[in-house]
Image: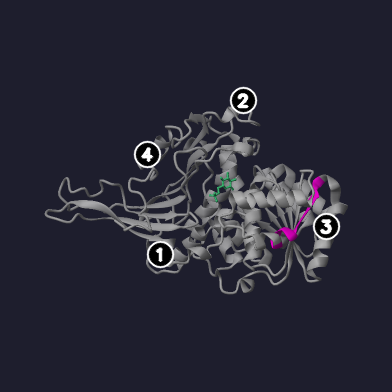
Amino acid sequence: MAKNPASLGPKFPQVVVLVGATGDLSRRKLLPGLFHLVSAGFIPGCRIVGVSLDDIDADGFRQIAREALDQFSSRKAANGAWAAFSECLDYVPMKAGPAALKAAVERAEAALGAETRRIHYLSVPPSAALPAVHLLAEAELVGRCRIVMEKPFGTDLASAVDLNGRLHQVFSEEQIFRIDHFLGKEAAQNILAFRFGNGLFEPIWNRNFIDHVQIDVPETLALGKRAPFYEATGAYRDMVVTHLFQILGFMAMEPPTALEPGPINEEKNKVFRSMLPIDPRDVVRGQYVGFRSEAGVDPESDTETFIALKCHIDNWRWAGVPFFLRTGKRMAEGQRIISIAFREPPKSMFPVGSGVGAQGPDHLTFDLADASRLSLSFYGKRPGPGMRLDKLSMQFAMHDTGLIGEVLEAYERLILDAMRGDRTLFTSAEGIERLWQVSTPLLENPPPVRLYEPGSWGPKTIHQLIAPHAWRLPFERAWRDPNGAGS
Ligand code: BG6
């Protein structure tokens, strides 16, 4: 545990208005995350006012929160800590209206003192975002506040511009924190440390040395209760235009002049400005067999639950280097990797049959899991007579640091940053609008969805998309087990 958590948290007590408080994200991540931040002492004083369509009272909400912690929290909720946290929870059903919400927030503020700040967390689908903003405005809760918005920010360029315009009628840009939880992952921030904290890698981080890049996020989970949300969203809007492109931004950007929101966003936005529009011919859309019979899904649904695509960043550093992105539900494995393939040596002096190049190019691989890992693979000599080469690797696992317990989950980290007013890891309106702009050809002219079997790696055409290269996943060699004897 961090030595003095309070010194890392916000200066002022916080009232969190959690809109969508009984929804999937809230139960899986936000309530467990807030529980940890409060019980570990990161927030000096905190009250949470839940708001949702469910017609329940504060006790009903406490029960939902308790069940959420039991089911989803990675840390066990000790009884004392739970009792203290449950005292912080209150609830207002949406239909009670702005006056009831205002009264609940004022009660919370009265308990915390005059210097309280508000944080409104909108954990709602895009269609419910503006009504929630208006509710907050009518409840006169715009002062002393920051608002955290969940993706997708709009559904295309026009709706994103419209959403930003309407948001600005109520909140100033400085108050708006657009969250992309992939940027809150420890491993995503480690990309910046790895690239810019060392002299070794940056000189080879360009088209002269890098052959291609893969950002691959297959998931095994099915959609379950989220099917209706997903039916209107799809894998491209849910994952690519948000998380995968943001990770691409960190991977591809130029060194920022400082580790601050302005310079970092500027460099990410330059990457997005250099991106070529997505060509629908470079996209494979897939749908798992069985999606159409899930509750809330159109039996003739054309929504993709899988997407793989090739994109290009047309600047001096990356011209000619393809970036392959893939993500989908109900796939064979759950992984989150960035894999960088280096160019092969120009000439080989090794005898025929030595095995050089036989196992693909050298790779640098980032595993974006909470317990993150990194691997650099290369050819080395197999011990013994003659000259046979094998693929070897150097690996680092977060476990090696002994500090795995210090890791904040992505949402915890970002909630804390928003409370502190630090927007370094948040996305900007300009960046998002540009990403919608490059997406326009695909959104206007999507290729038909192709079915894939649950438990597979997607439709067969993914291999054509990446040829003459190959997808890194499934891995030929598994990660070394950090707790094992090593191999
Ligand atoms: C969410 C998406 O933003 O990210 C989900 O809406 C997805 O569909 C999830 O499953 C993946 O996040 P993580 O942190 O589990 O990799």
Alpha-carbon span between mark 4 and mark 1 = 36 Å
Three-letter code, disc 1: Asp
Q: Residue at x 65, y 39 (%)?
A: 229
Alpha-carbon span between mark 2 and mark 4 = 33 Å
Alpha-carbon span between mark 3 and mark 1 = 46 Å
The quadrant where residue 291 appears? top right
SS category of the residue bearing label 4: loop
User: Along the polypeptide, which appears first: circle 4 or circle 1?
Assistant: 1
SS category of the residue bearing label 3: helix
User: Along the polypeptide, which appears first: circle 1 or circle 2?
Assistant: 2
Is the residue 34 above or below the residue 437 in the image?
below
The question of residue 354 being in magenta is answered with no
Three-letter code, disc 2: Pro
Three-letter code, disc 4: Ala
User: Along the polypeptide, which appears first: circle 3 or circle 1?
Assistant: 3
User: Along the polypeptide, which appears first: circle 4 or circle 3?
Assistant: 3
User: Looking at this view, is 23 or 84 the one in front?
Assistant: 84
Counting other residues with Cα less than 10 Å from the Cα at mark 3, is it few (<14), some (14-19), or many (20 or more)? some
Location of the N terminus (image quadrant): bottom right
Task: Give the extent of the magenta segment.
Answer: 84-94
Tell me, for residue 105, which label it has, or none. none
Q: Is residue 132 visible?
A: yes
Is the residue 370 above or below the residue 12 in the image?
above
Q: Residue furthest front?
A: 79
Kindly indicate whether the residue at mark 4 contacts the one at mark 2 (C-beta within 8 angstroms): no
Q: Which residue is mark 2?
A: 299
Q: Which residue is mark 3?
A: 104
Three-letter code, disc 3: Ala
Counting other residues with Cα less than 10 Å from the Cα at mark 1, is it few (<14), some (14-19), or many (20 or more)? few
Q: Residue at x 70, y 48 (%)?
A: 64
Tell me, for residue 467, which label it has, or none. 4
Q: Which residue is mark 1?
A: 400
